[in-house]
């Protein structure tokens, strides 16, 4: 990233400088414009320099705790890949504002928004969510008019903004948390909405991401067309997937990252196409997950990988959540 940006900055500033010097042979006063070459170099370098500064900062402990507790994908990564995940997340949260609408946005919520953004692009080098400037966190579901109060249908859990809200994503806070709290239900509204942005990167939200090569695009289009005509006869896939091509891609992206082994078993061809589009193999990643034998005992290591005993960690939290628990 830094090396290619340096080369680009040098090439542009050199070209601008050479152009000015060329004009100076005809009009010597144009040499006064030579500092524009430096300005061009600074302009090209400024974003990359900012990112390098952000990457150099320590990863916040509160984000690490949230990822360890809620994001199984992160826990399964090798150490070098975790660092890559952290760097991408730091840059994303530095450049995209996360704002609460009638609800507080704590660091756990910000971390889960960051994780939702990073997971789909871990295999896509140099991918950027260009145009996204803000993620709005709502206290619950909302309607098509983005309202959470008053009359009307409020079943929407997430949405990428259009028209005057272009460049904005809206997520329901309870649904965002629920998506990561249950990693086996094939539902994650954060991943769903960011999958739409991966799809939108080529300018169209049409269910064909920019990362899809010619090799996979033709069979994918044919597959999705047949699926939509079948009106959802395949078991295990949310009916919402059959709304249109874009929703099919987003819903299947949830499935792909939440239950990859199950998806691969049910539809190997479908899994393989998604693997090629995302340049990731979450089934292989999740194969590192330790198998649990029977019930977790009080003195066993906690399954959330906190390093604590079960009785001092998730069992205590579970007991507090029960009626009468403290």
Image (cartoon, rainbow, N blue to C red):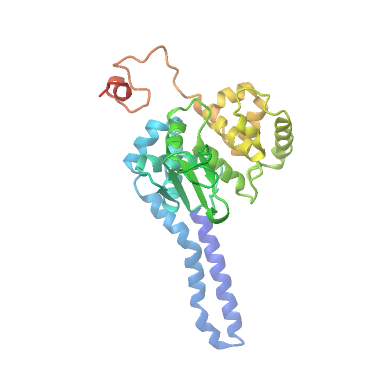
Say which residue appears at 60% left-offset and 86% top-offset: 25
Q: Is residue 313 above or below residue 49?
A: above
Quarter residue 8 falls in: bottom right
Residue 290 image offset from top left, x and y in percent: 44, 20
Towards the viewer: 159 or 141: 141
Say which residue appears at 59% left-offset and 88% top-offset: 27
Towards the viewer: 135 or 265: 135
Q: Seen in the image, is 309 located left or right of residue 229?
A: left
In the current view of this chain or complex, which residue is farthest to the front? 151
How many marks on residues? 0
Towards the viewer: 296 or 178: 178
Towards the viewer: 87 or 1: 87
Residue 177 image offset from top left, x and y in percent: 42, 34
Q: Seen in the image, is 6 located left or right of residue 235?
A: left
Q: Quadrant of the C terminus?
A: top left
Residue 121 visible to an observer of this rendering: no
Quarter residue 104 falls in: top left
Residue 115 image offset from top left, x and y in percent: 45, 40
Q: Is residue 59 above or below residue 70?
A: below
Q: Seen in the image, is 243 located left or right of residue 180?
A: right
Q: Is residue 66 above or below residue 204?
A: above
In the current view of this chain or complex, which residue is farthest to the top? 294
Residue 261 image offset from top left, x and y in percent: 56, 24
């Amino acid at each position: 990233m830094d090396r290619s940006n340096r080369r680009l900055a040098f090439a542009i500033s050199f070209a601008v400088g050479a152009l000015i010097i060329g004009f100076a042979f005809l009009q010597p006063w144009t040499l006064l414009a030579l500092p524009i070459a430096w300005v061009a170099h600074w302009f090209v370098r400024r974003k990359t320099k900012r990112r390098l500064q952000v990457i150099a900062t320590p990863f916040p402990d509160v984000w690490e705790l949230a990822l360890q507790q809620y994001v199984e994908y992160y826990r399964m990564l090798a150490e070098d890949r975790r660092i890559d995940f952290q760097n991408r997340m730091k840059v994303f949260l530095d450049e995209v504002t996360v704002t609460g609408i009638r609800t507080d946005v704590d660091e756990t919520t910000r971390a889960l928004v960051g994780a939702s953004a990073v997971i789909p692009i871990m295999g896509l080098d140099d991918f950027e969510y260009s145009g996204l400037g803000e993620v709005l966190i709502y206290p619950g579901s909302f309607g098509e008019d983005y309202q959470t109060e008053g009359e009307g249908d409020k079943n929407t859990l997430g949405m990428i903004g259009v028209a005057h809200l272009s460049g904005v994503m809206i997520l329901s806070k309870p649904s965002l948390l629920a998506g990561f709290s249950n990693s086996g239900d094939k539902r994650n509204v954060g991943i769903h909405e960011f999958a739409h942005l991966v799809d939108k990167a080529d300018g169209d939200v049409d269910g064909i991401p920019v990362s899809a090569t010619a090799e996979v695009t033709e069979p994918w289009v044919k597959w999705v067309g047949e699926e939509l005509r079948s009106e959802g006869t395949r078991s295990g896939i949310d009916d919402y997937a059959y709304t249109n091509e874009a929703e099919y891609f987003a819903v299947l992206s949830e499935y792909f990252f939440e239950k990859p082994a199950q998806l691969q078993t049910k539809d190997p061809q479908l899994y393989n196409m998604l693997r090629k589009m995302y340049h990731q193999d979450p089934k292989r990643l999740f194969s590192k997950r330790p198998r649990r034998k029977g019930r977790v005992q009080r003195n066993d290591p906690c399954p959330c990988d906190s390093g604590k005993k079960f009785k001092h960690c998730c069992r205590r939290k579970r007991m507090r959540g029960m009626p009468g628990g403290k």
